[in-house]
Amino acid sequence: MSLFQELKRRNVFRVGAAYAVTAWVVVQIGEAVFPAFGVPDALFRGMVILLVLGFPVALVFAWAFEKTPEGIKLEKNVDPSQSITPVTGKKLDKGIIVVLAIAVVFLLYREATAPDRESAGESPQIASDVSSSTVTMPTSVMPPASEKSIAVLPFSNLSEDESNAFFASGVQEDILTYLSRVADLKVISRTSVLQYAGFKGDVRQVARELGVNHILEGSVRRSGNRVRVTAQLIDARDDEHVWAENYDRDLTDVFAIQTEVAQEIVKALKASLSPEEAKMISTRPTSNVEAYDAYLQARELIRRPEYGSENFRKALPFAQRAVQLDPEFALAYVQLANLYGQMYWLVAQDQTFIDKARSAMDNAQRLAPDMPQVQFGWGEFYYRMYSDYPRALKEFESAQTLLPNDSDLLWKLGTTQRRLGRWDDSVASYQRAIRMDPDNNQVVNVLAETLGFIGRWQEAVTVLEQAASRNPGYGVYRILEAQIRLDYGGDLDFAREVLASAQQVPDQSYIYLTTGYTWRSRNYPAAIEAWTDPTNPFLADANFEAAGQNALGKIYREMGDNARAEMYFQRAIERARERFSQGGVDWYDYHVQQSIAYAYLGDSSTAMSEIDRATAMRPESADALYGVQVSIARAEVLMIVGRTDEALAEIKRLLTVPVGLTVWILRQDPTWDPLREDPRFKAMVAEVPGT
């Protein structure tokens, strides 16, 4: 018998094929899964080496040994007439077929989920996310990276003057912005890369965490009228430098540097570039470096993670200076309008802010009517100033076609869509924003919140749990999970556990959970403490002060202290009137809070007049988010003034709409105690699945 025939008889070829296919599948799965569990690269390489070394060992084993009914024996000790190698060979054939099937399924899965298939609009994966009952979002298990994917890490500030850090940050962010305008690229947004400022470790680990194949690093040194920018593009798959360049030029050439860096990256990644995209990349925002400086300093303040009016107040003079220094600076006018919008939103509903914002946007429109950032600015203007959500959505959608990778724009798009009751579209927009900005806590939060609003609260919990595993230091995730479990599952125990273990965080979600839990668990002294806590943002925010007064009035009423309850209801009316007289713009919530207070004080006529006015100002048809909150207040007022039939009808309806009431709220919230013995109310509460 020839050597070839003997190798065939002993199944050496089959063993070799089975080993090779199995090892390949193991390597592919390991490459996809190991990063998710933080397995070091060295361990992965060690596994590959062992698999390679094991191949000749497997062949030798197949040649020297044979499987028999009595077990494994040396081949020379087996009687050829009793050999079962043909049977073993058939089993190996079946095993090879099974492993090959697994390999084919794995390859099809990777192809189907590859981010390369993303486009400026919906991607196949995103479409699947929307139609599926389970939300897909980036977690520690990132999808396979797109070939044309990149993260621009924060540039190092090498200037002698540390105050120039804002300039280095501005150069990096503008390069990132230029790249995000290219639809053929996947560009990770600013929020997710900030954590890698000053990073000196393995860029491959960063790339895996962000789900990209390429990393851009750089530094900026500014001295007098000169600037030196260093940039290097790294292929993170093998830690190889793809491109690097040093630019040493006059400060006025900083815009040309940013454009050249973006163009070189587009070229290196072989991304297609439309004429419109090429024009946007090459357009200088201003020719005045001082104006650009002021614009960057304002942007640095706006971008601070602690969202609040103080940062916007500090940023406003810089934005004003930018347009004074360069009256042709369109982006600075957009920035200025946004700041006036924030002041209107957070400080006072003052007509003056509306007028100033419109003037700034008119100037931006005159200077750059086709600039997508101007369209973005108009969307913000109509959203904040007029609650004109259809007009705002039109502007955001128009801007998004030219800014496909802008996570801030996708976030605002989703927020506007849910105001209009387009809930599935809103979820899809938030998911796309997270793809571009996987570590943006605010987008994760609003996605989970929205899923809860539309009854998919178990998915919301999953989103928050996955996000917490990716960012365990961000305590708000667990607080929001407790709130969702409380509202949609009535889980008081989980809320208590979270509040007992969580440190107080400077976030409204902590106060929402604290006040909601203490009220619904009927721990009234603790509820009073929560509502009078100096860190309670409702106490610091004059716009919501009337709501806090009403909450305290309801608590004391439940405790039987009617005199003190009336005092707080009177205060709620006074605070609402004060805000109206100071703000200059009539706000629907002033009327909501006055209506509730008048109802508890026994003035039914005024209570109904106020809630009718609030409903007319904020109908559900115009605002599917806060219009429903007005309707919930209306149901409460109807109940208090004794119009029980109408209240019950409204409650029944509100159990069926997004953002409405839940049976768990009705069961636990003392607000609804007056209806507790009504058979119709009992029937509604009893209709809880599983009860």
Image (tube, rainbow, N blue to C red):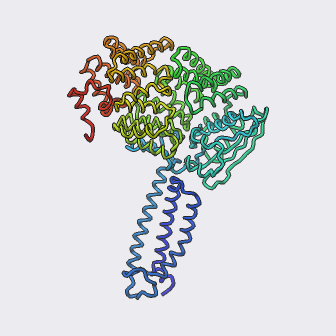
**What x and y, as percent, mark residue 157?**
71, 39
Q: Is residue 62 left or right of residue 201?
A: left
Q: Is residue 502 left or right of residue 360?
A: left
Residue 40 in sight: yes
Q: Quadrant of residue 197?
A: top right
Q: Is residue 260 left or right of residue 309?
A: right
**What x and y, as percent, mark residue 393?**
48, 28
Q: Quadrant of residue 177?
A: top right
Which of 377 and 476 lies nearest the eye of the viewer?
476
Q: Quadrant of residue 161?
A: top right
- Residue at horizontal 46 percent and vertical 29 percent from the top: 416
Q: Quadrant of the C terminus?
A: top left
**What x and y, as percent, mark residue 84?**
38, 81
Q: Name the residue at the left extreme.
A: 679
Q: Is residue 677 left or right of residue 535?
A: left
- Residue at horizontal 68 percent and vertical 31 percent from the top: 284
Residue 124 in sight: no
- Residue at horizontal 52 percent and vertical 62 percent from the top: 27
Q: How many marks?
A: 0
**What x and y, as percent, mark residue 142?**
51, 49
